[in-house]
Image: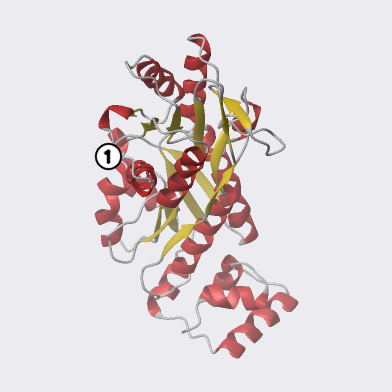
Amino acid sequence: MRPTIHTVAERAGVSIATVSRYLNGSARLGPATAIKVRRAIDELGYVPNAAARGLAMQSTETLALVFPRLSGPFFSELIRGAESAAQEMGYHLLIYGASNDNTKMVPTLAAKVDGLILASEGICLGCLETLQQRDTPVVVLGRTTRHASVDSLRPENIGGAQTAVTHLLGHGYRRIAMIAGPRTQQHAADRERGYEMALQSHGIPYDPALVVYGDFGEASGYRTMQDLLFQTKPIDAVFAANDQMAIGALAAAGEAGIRVPEDVALIGFDDITAACYAQPPLTTVHQDMHGQGHLAVRMLLARIGGSTEATVTEVTPTELVVRRSCGCRADGSRMRINNRMVHN
């Protein structure tokens, strides 16, 4: 593999920005730092290509992270991880909240930074073509993209959802409902697919009447849980496609006098901070948002540094964090649910 400015920086133990400054002579470096960079370049046989050199000369040493909602707890750890990686590599990180009605601002933003991390599906669909035409380095979060030269990063949504529903099935639940996310979003569709696959593996047909759709916010979880609780045939359990909807569902159940997990079990997805403080504590699928933010920055900086590798799609692992809302006790012992014994 041909060495890049990224591998030079790693070998020298400095940031990509420092290597860029050495190459273009835009700032004086200390003698010891300059020697380390020069030695790394010689050892690796690095030769900056014209595109990489041009990018270095125009570097703003700033990256942008773009996502739809600044207030959501889901993104806080992602931001922290991205900020940590950017600082380690000598870059600034601009946090930009956008929605589908102002996606035209993203190409304008791109002109002011060295690269973008896009965490909004609507924004990605609306502006990727323009960004590609401008040769702007981009990493897309949350879904796989078909665009050439655009790297992507997403959690194992299908497997994580399948693990959660399989856990409920292992408890003996059979009428398992799902509060799904918007059908237009790939990660929501993947989690619904994992739900369906888990049911099918146990010989349980997918029942559309047991699947309701929210928007990933608490209010939609509250509203859709009300619909599920008053079906003619009672449900045993609910898998929510994210923790915010699960927390809304938990509130709706309590208001209706339905006990979780004694009457209805509940599992979420994401493992946000509030999940462990819910009453009862929420069993959920954990994804490492801090790690994803860190990895997204490193992927982006590799492209900024001139990497010519084929398009990269990173899928990060998920794991089930078992608490009490699914019917498990804190010590892992079995618990009596609806007058029957269930097992972990």
- Please indicate whether residue 92 sits to the left or right of residue 124 in the image: right
Q: Quadrant of residue 73?
A: top right
Compared with 288, 225 (above or below) is: above
Q: Residue at x 55, y 32 (%)?
A: 326
Q: Secondary structure at mark 1?
A: loop
- In the picture of the structure, the residue carrying the numbered disc 1 is 184
Three-letter residue code for mark 1? Thr
Q: Residue at x 50, y 82 (%)?
A: 3
Residue 71 in sight from this viewpoint: no
Q: Nearer the viewer, residue 265 or 49?
A: 265
Residue 275 in percent (x, y) is at 59, 31
| Crowding near the residue tagged with mark 1, few <14, some 14–19, many ≥20 C-alpha atoms within 10 Å | few
Which quadrant would the C terminus be assigned to in this image? top right
Q: Residue at x 26, y 32 (%)?
A: 208
Q: Quadrant of residue 18?
A: bottom right
Q: Residue at x 54, y 38 (%)?
A: 284
